[in-house]
Amino acid sequence: MVNELLEIIGIFLVVLGGLLNIIGSIGMLRFPSYFLRIHAATVAVIGGSVVPLVGIAFLSYGIHGSEGVVTSLGALGTAAFIFITAPVSSHAISRAAARMRMPRGPLTHDHLEEDGK
Amino acid sequence: MIDLLLNVAISMFVLSIVFSLYRMIRGPTVPDRMLALDVISYGLAVVMGLIAIVSGSPYLIVISFSLALWFFIGALYVARYLEGEEIGE
Amino acid sequence: MMELIVNLLLASCVMLTAAIVYTKDLLLAVVLSGAEGVMVAVIFYLLLAPDIALVQVAAGVGISTAFFIVGLRKLRRHEE
């Protein structure tokens, strides 16, 4: 009974993550400027990689029982690592892009230009 | 049922990787391509986890963690070069 | 399923290599070679050689990108 419940929760999280990853990739395909594409990439990384890895942790323990504990703990560790380090690398690259004065797309108000930096 | 949904999920990730690959080939500047590589490599880490479930071997998830770790280091080096700072050692 | 993914990754490897050969921006070539390292590692993984995939991830994505960029700081970024 518990195993079927874990399988249902896990497969729901994995399919939800696949949908979010497709939505983020379509956003990366369609948005016109770099600073808009960061938004879509955040959807595709946090919603599309951390959520399915948590789902993989549930699903592995649900399908394989106590033999799948290693895969389950590894998936949880990978999810925690991506959740910590993906914003760090994305922020580093976008800070460099802001220093390079890349075009900022359709704007209504530019706080970055007001700060003079 | 679970196997069918796992195959559907793997197909979804492969489709999104194809979309990001178009941005990777054609993105105008280097930060665009680094962003597309971000989405591609974390998506492939999830695909490797799904295949580790399908095959059932307990040692296959290590490569997913390793891919996330080494891609983070490479992205930091590219960002340091773009910012024009000095790279330690 | 596996054959389809392997064929798609091989086709993307060919496209990325063509882009590396024809570009004039050396930093762009380094980034694209990192992407090709990811693809080759996943191909090794799908062909059931996980130990080689572990080494390929470490060498192709992390270390070669870091060494090429440390070397590229002593050169000009654009060719010709």
Image (cartoon, coloured by chain):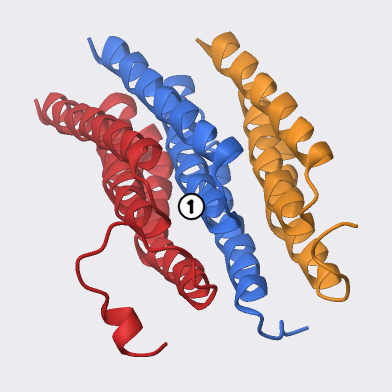
Q: Residue at x 39, y 18 (%)?
A: B11
**Viewer-closest of B49 and A40:** A40
* Amino acid type, callout 1: Leu
Visible residue check, residue B35: yes
Residue at image position (45%, 44%) is B39
- Residue B76 image offset from top left, x and y in percent: 58, 69
Q: In the picture provided, is A100 more to the left or to the right than C20?
A: left
Q: Is residue B83 left or right of residue A80?
A: right
Q: Measuring from the top left, give residue B9's x and y in whole percent.
A: 32, 22
Residue C29 lies left or right of residue B27; in this view the side is right
* Viewer-nearest residue: A100 or A108: A108
Determine the chain carrying the residue at label 1: B
Q: Can see residue C49? A: no
Q: Image height check: is B23 above or below B1?
A: below
- Foreground of the two, C57 or B22: B22
Q: Spot the orange chain and give its letter.
A: C
- Specify the quadrant of the image occupied by residue C62: bottom right
For residue C5, above or below residue B47: above
Chain A shade: red
Q: Is residue A34 above or below residue C74?
A: above
Name the quadrant containing residue C65: bottom right
Callout 1 crowding tier (Cα within 10 Å): few <14, some 14–19, many ≥20: many
Image colour assigned to chain B: blue
Q: Is residue A63 left or right of residue B58?
A: left
Residue at mark 1: B35
Instruction: State the residue lying farthest toward the bottom.
Output: A116
Q: Quadrant of the C terminus of chain A?
A: bottom left
**What percent of the width, then of the height, locates residue C52?**
75, 37
User: Relative to the observer, which residue lies in front, C62 or A24?
Assistant: A24
Q: Check the picture and name the quadrant holding the N terminus of chain A.
A: top left
Helix, strand, or loop for circle 1?
A: helix
